[in-house]
Image (cartoon, helix red, strand yellow):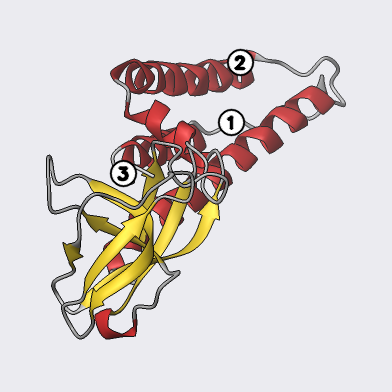
Amino acid sequence: MRIATTAARLLAAGFLAFSLLLLLAVGLGPRTGAYRTVTVLTGSMRPTMAEGSVIVTTPVPARSLRVGDVITYRIPVEDRRVVTHRVVEIVRGGDRPVVRTKGDANASPDGWVAELKGGTVWKVRATVPQLGWVLEWLRRPQARQLLVLGVPLLSLVLLLRDIWRRPSTPDDPAPSPASPMPGTVALLALLTLGAATGAGRG
């Protein structure tokens, strides 16, 4: 029983650490402006970036843009959605470059040229496969309800179990009550993550 209790507490501590790490890296870090995270929703950049990947982008001077760079930007047509595609042509350079892009998995370039305003461009630096599916799940109302109800309930059950347990013999030390705080902190971290990462097409 003592081994099971220790394992449960280690698992809870690991879950808390993982949740806080994700919160810092994906939820709070992008607010500094040093980088952004975006979830890839389509397969147009396969095999470089599969659906469900989370990409990390950093701002670079627009005039430093080169053919072959992968950038995240808002397209100038249709619904002005955010896409992450590779630059295949620089029509005009400078601080407000005009570029043509293409998805690696697409047969032809995008049907538009885009003027990148603002003096900086968000360039892809890293890709984390599959993490996006977790973040997309956290955005769903059902997932939020499960977390809001499930995590506090589990924390309460563990707390009550430790309070009600008694030493089996006089020589056994009484178990120290478990704290519901790790579960609560993890819950807050996961709920924040649910709305922290932007979504865009590949």
How many residues crowd around disc 3 within 10 Å: few (fewer than 14), some, or many (20 or more)?
some
Q: Give the amino acid type for the residue marked by disc 3 in the picture.
A: Gly
Quick check: 178 above or below 149?
below
Residue 119, x across and y down, in percent: 18, 79
Task: Name the quadrant containing residue 189.
Answer: top left
Q: Which label's residue is closer to the chain start, 2 or 3?
A: 2
Determine which residue is flagged by label 2: 161
Q: Give the amino acid type for the residue marked by disc 1 in the picture.
A: Ala
Local SS, label 2? helix
Local SS, label 1? loop
Q: Distance between the residues labelled 1 and 3?
A: 41 Å
Local SS, label 3? strand
37 vs 67, nearest the viewer:
67
| Direction from residue 71 to residue 92 in the image, left or right | left
**Residue drawn at (54%, 22%), measured in percent from left and top?**
159
Q: Which label's residue is closer to the chain start, 1 or 3?
A: 1
Quick check: 41 above or below 68?
above
Q: How far apart are marks 2 and 3 (CA)?
A: 45 Å
Residue 149, x across and y down, in percent: 37, 16
Q: Distance between the residues labelled 1 and 2?
A: 9 Å
41 vs 167, nearest the viewer:
41
Determine which residue is flagged by label 1: 178
Instruction: Please give the label number shown on residue 200.
Output: 3
Residue 13, x across and y down, in percent: 62, 41
Quick check: 199 above or below 66?
above
Residue 77, x across and y down, in percent: 12, 47
| Direction from residue 161 to residue 78 in the image, left or right | left
53 vs 173, nearest the viewer:
53
